[in-house]
Amino acid sequence: MKITGAKVFVGGPGKNYVTLKIVTDQGVYGLGDATLNNRETLPAAYLTDYLIPNLIDMDPRKSEDIWQLFYRGAYFRRGPIAMAAFGAIDMALWDIKGKLANMPLYDLFGGKSRDSAMVYAHATGADLPDLMDSITRYVEQGYKAVRVQCGIPGMATAGYAVPEEVGGKGDYMTDFSGIIPKTEIWEADRYMRYMPQALADIRAKFGQELKILHDVHHRLSPREAAAFSKAVEPVDLYWLEDPTPAEDQDALRLIRQHSTTPIAIGEVFNSVWDCNKLIKNELIDFIRIAVTYGGGITPLKRIVDLAGMHHVRTGFHGAPSHSPISMAAQHHLNAWAPNFGIQEYLVLGTPECDALFPSDHVMQNGMMHVSDAPGLGVDFDENEAAKYEFKPGSHPIVRLQDGTMWDY
Ligand code: CS2
Ligand code: MG
């Protein structure tokens, strides 16, 4: 059996999805997602210019050897661009494997460990009352877990993941449009004075059953992160995410020494080596690495197993930049993983997105029911894809009040 061709598509409704399609001499094809948010053309070029020419004539069933070949053979390996490109190939080869076996991927991994997998939504508010309304809407839809973010009174700009207009209603998505980034202003002391009480108010209003998550988005120093984790302990968060930038992994010890608040980290990680120390030293509770930037299903299965040995559960990244293809790969991993925790779930869910990626993975009452179709269980409509073109975007940047650059 041979790979006879592969093609990359960039574009989509409201997002520049990077979709890889690998075709074989037996008519079976596989799909992969290489979407690297706001840098989408880079993994696309890596695939088109370097990897696809090597794939032609290879046996698509040898997903392990092909992964090792590209990873070890790259020399300048790791990093989000290369790993997103390897990840897309790996997903597509697993998709082919499942279709050849006529089995959904979760069965190839070892079978289902649960009937459905809990997901969490993003509730946001310009201010706390606005956030409370947003949470109410998700609770009414049956969500059992909600990530909560709101504007901080007195902060010059709205802050991470909150609407720019006070009192704005409805779901908010960060404005990534345009190549010149927008600027947000960050004030850690104001945030630290306000947010613990806001989280306590949310707990008081919604009761003990709701799973409450909060994302600091890498903005606190290790000491501040330790103090914040301790201050929010009575809220009983499901997790506190990215309290501090994770490049300095030893800093996580300080948080552990001061608090029992569960910590989730890893959405910007690219390999098992980024996770290894945090998992082995049991400095985190949830690993957030994504199947896309983490290099695909093959390495993620290893990370899941390593995590399981150290009481670390999964909580894979699921920002809207992930296409339904990588989300499908994660739905299968989530159905199988014995140490599954929760899944972030924000697929656009518009009729345009559903037309581009037809699938029968079903989200209901805050639970994801994985498709039983062979392979990934998601398709890609090339006629629909022809409607979209690449539109460059940028993450906002963050500065302190005096202009000092900070972490977004
Ligand atoms: C966020 C991300 O979903 C999350 O937890 O931290 O949305 C992040 O801001 C984006 O993925 C950046 O591209
Ligand atoms: Mg996050």
Image (cartoon, grey):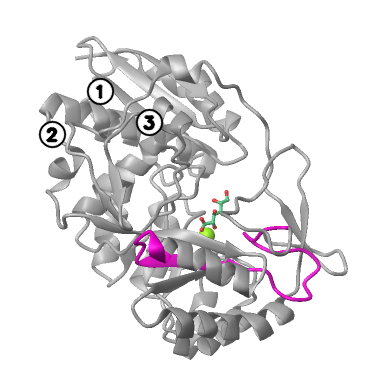
Which is nearer the N-term, disc 1 or disc 3? 3
Proximity of marks 1 and 3: CB atoms separated by less than 8 Å: no
Find residue 238 and report its image quarter.
Answer: bottom left
- Depicted 156 relative to depicted 255: above or below: above
Q: Amino acid at mark 2?
A: Met
Badge 3, how many Cα within 10 Å: few under 14, some, many 20+?
Answer: many
Badge 1, how many Cα within 10 Å: few under 14, some, many 20+?
Answer: many
Range shown magenta: 139-164
Which is nearer the N-term, disc 2 or disc 3? 3
- Depicted 9 relative to depicted 125: above or below: above
Which residue in the structure is indicated by mark 2?
103
- The answer to whether any part of residue 239 appears in the image is yes
User: Which x, y percent locates residue 325?
Assistant: 37, 35
User: Which x, y percent locates residue 400?
Assistant: 80, 68
Residue 60 numbered mark, or none? 1
* Quadrant placement of the N terminus: top left
- Depicted 17 relative to depicted 195: above or below: above
Q: Amino acid at mark 1?
A: Pro
User: Which x, y percent locates residue 236?
Assistant: 41, 83
